[in-house]
Amino acid sequence: MRMQNKVVFSLLCIVLLATSVACAQEKDIEGSKDHPLISRFAGSIINHYDVKQFDEYILPLGKLDEELKLSKSQRLAGKITRIQYEAPEDRSTLEMYRNYELALDKAGFEILFTGTLRELGRRWTGQLYGDINPLRGGDARLDIQSNEDFRYLSAKLSRPGEGDVYVTLCISLGLRWPTIQLDVIEVKPMETGLVTAGTMLDDIARTGRVAIYGIYFDTDKADVKPESEPTLEEIAKLLQQNPELKLHVVGHTDNVGGLSYNMKLSEARADAVAKELVSKYGVDVKRLEAHGVGPLSPVASNKTEEGRAKNRRVELVEQ
């Protein structure tokens, strides 16, 4: 089965029009790359790239209703790769769309839902990428929006035993240039057991702080997601086992977006974590202080997605 998938994915890359590797390496944003399962359209350049090892994604399977909510959708969770390409100006959305559609079909994907501007309405791209599955960064959201022409599809590749793969594709004329937004969702369970009370205590004893990566938020929001519960339980256990320990809960972000915005967002997220520990796990509010430092204390370069992912974290600092 694994060998069959490799052949299928190779075919997918071949069917799409060949691209100039040298050109892509010169012009793609630093740290970005094509998804290994799906190639790019010839002459396209990556101008936005975001990868989450585990997150949620709302898969559109129906039109927007009168309240701008999806009439039908499916909630997915797994590895999310979001790639936005600046497409060639001399190619139509129809030509690009049909190349991708053909490649997906030959690779074994089932097309689940499709639509055009005429069928889905002008609010589709703005709502989908600004509210339902928001793209980080104002330019990324704006570049996929279109008042003239766009084509959209959702597709699925069944992989028994390995986890299904879903794809959403939107090709639009954009407000500045033709744009291809490709989102790939590789369904998988969340990796657990990465943070324990014991390992946190060891780090605090050694350095006075511990970086936490098991607390999850939606993009640009401060609501703690349910997947964070295992990590919150371990933090609560740490505090229960060490009754004299008091902590600063410190929120950190990458440098995407304005400094003022990220400072407020990081503080709001730290405050949300502290409130969860108090309200759900019975931690004494006097043992926690929430702070936000935005992008001011990075642990890696913000020039790559891997670095930005490391910088988006919550730290527990001994008072």
Image (tube, helix red, strand yellow):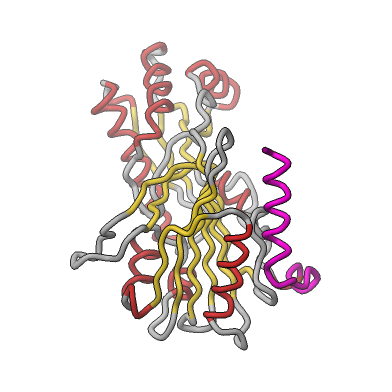
Of residues 310 and 86, the one nearer the viewer is 86
Question: Residue 314 at what x, y percent from top left?
Answer: 46, 38
Q: Which quarter of the rendering shows the N terminus?
A: top right
Question: Residue 159 at what x, y percent from top left?
Answer: 57, 41
Question: Residue 278 at what x, y percent from top left?
Answer: 27, 27
Q: Residue at x 34, y 29 (%)?
A: 288
Q: Is residue 47 visible?
A: no
The image quadrant that residue 33 belongs to is: bottom right
Of residues 259 and 100, the one nearer the viewer is 100
Of residues 42 and 141, the one nearer the viewer is 42
Numbered range of the magenta stretch: 1-25
Q: Residue at x 33, y 25 (%)?
A: 287
Identify whether 211 is placed above or below 87: above
Question: Residue 245 at what x, y percent from top left?
Answer: 41, 19
Q: Inspect the magenta stretch and tell me whether residue 59 lies in it.
A: no
Q: Residue at x 47, y 31 (%)?
A: 317
Identify whether 48 is placed above or below 263: below
Residue 162 vs residue 61: left or right?
right
Q: Residue at x 47, y 46 (%)?
A: 252
Residue 4 vs residue 194: left or right?
right
Residue 130 vs residue 198: left or right?
left
| Residue reaching furthest to the bottom | 90
Q: Is residue 16 visible?
A: yes
Identify whether 151 is placed above or below 294: below
Report how many numbered discs are placed on residues in the image. Answer: 0
Q: Which quarter of the rendering shows the C terminus?
A: top left
Of residues 246 and 105, the one nearer the viewer is 105
Q: Is the stretch drawn in magenta largely helix, strand or loop?
A: helix
| Residue reaching furthest to the left | 66
